Amino acid sequence: MSSSDIFIGETIGTAILILLGGGVCAAVTLKASKARNAGWLAITFGWGFAVLTAVYTSAPLSGAHLNPAVTIGIAIKDNAWGDVPTYFAGQLLGAMIGAALVWAAYAGQFHAHLTDKDIVGGPGAQATTAKAVEAQEKGAGPVLGVFSTGPEIRNVVQNLITEIIGTVVLVLAVLTQGLNDSGKGLGTLGALITAFVVVSIGLSLGGPTGYAINPARDLGPRIVHALLPLPNKGGSDWGYAWIPVVGPLVGGAIAAGIYNVAFA
C-alpha cells in the first residue's frame, strides 16, 4: 500500500464511519427526526453497521484501520511504525469530514433542536426538561453527544479505565480474528467479526462513557462541533476530551502487548 492509498482509504473509510455512526446518534437525539428516542439498541447496531460499511469500502486501499488504536496495535505487533502518521492523518481528517456531513444531513433538525427552549433553556422552558441545560453547565452542549462521547458519571479514573478496557477488547479481537492475510489491515470476514465486536462493546461496556474506543472518532467530530455555527450549541467539553484519546491509545497498546505475549 502506498502512502497516498493509505491516506485516501483512511479518509474515505473514517468519513463513512462517522457519517453513519454520528448519523444514528443524530437520528435518535434530534427534534423532528423520525428516529428520535429509538434508544441505545439503535445506536449500538447503527455503529456496528457503520463499521461494517466503512471497512468494506476502505479495506482495498488502506486495510481499513479507521482507528488510531488499531493502528497502534498493529504497529506494536509488527514493530512497523513508518505508516502510522499517514494513518493518523487520514483518520482524523475523515472523522472531521464525516461529522460535517452529519451536520449537513440533519441541518434542519439541528436548528429545530437548538432553538427549542425546552431543550436549550431560557424563558418559558420547562424545569422538567432541563437535562441538556444541566449538561451545558458541565461543559457539554445539548447536541455534543451527536458528535463525541461523554461520561454519565464524571470520574477520571473510572472513565479512563472504561475506555481502556473497551479498546483492549476491540483491538485484541482485530489482532486475533480480524486481520487479512498480510496482517496489515482488516479482511473480509474480519470486517464482519469486528462489526459485531463493536456492537457487543456498545451493549456491554458503552453505558459509562459512550464507548469512544477510537481517538479519531471522538476528537475529529469534537473539533467540528466547536467550529460549526450552531445556535445555542453549548460547550465542546474539552476538559473531558483527552480521555477518549488517551484511553483508547493505551488500550490498543495493551492489546498488542497481550497479543505478542499470548498469541504471537
Image (cartoon, rainbow, N blue to C red):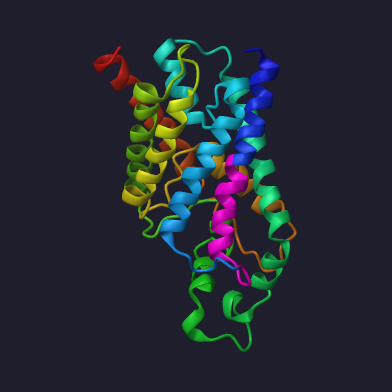
Which percent across, then down, holds residue 81?
52, 13
Horizontal relation, residue 68 to residue 93: left or right:
left
Q: Residue 111 falls in which quadrant of the image?
A: bottom right
Q: Is residue 256 above or below residue 79?
A: below
Q: In this view, does 43 lie above or below 138?
A: above
Residue pictured at 62% horizontal, 64% vertical: 234
Residue 242 inside the magenta-drawn segment: no
Task: Answer whether residue 240 is visible to the viewer in this image.
Answer: no
Which percent across, then down, holds residue 60?
60, 21
Q: In which quarter of the image is the N terminus?
A: top right
Q: In this view, does 35 lie above or below 75?
A: below
Residue pictured at 61% horizontal, 28% vertical: 58
Residue pictured at 31% horizontal, 15% vertical: 260
Residue pictured at 65% horizontal, 36% vertical: 94
Q: Which of 93 and 62 is in front in this view?
A: 62
Q: In which quarter of the image is the C terminus?
A: top left
Q: Nearer the viewer, residue 111 or 183?
A: 183
Q: Nearer the viewer, residue 143 or 51?
A: 51
Question: Magenta stretch?
Answer: 17-33
Task: Answer whether residue 72 is visible to the viewer in this image.
Answer: yes
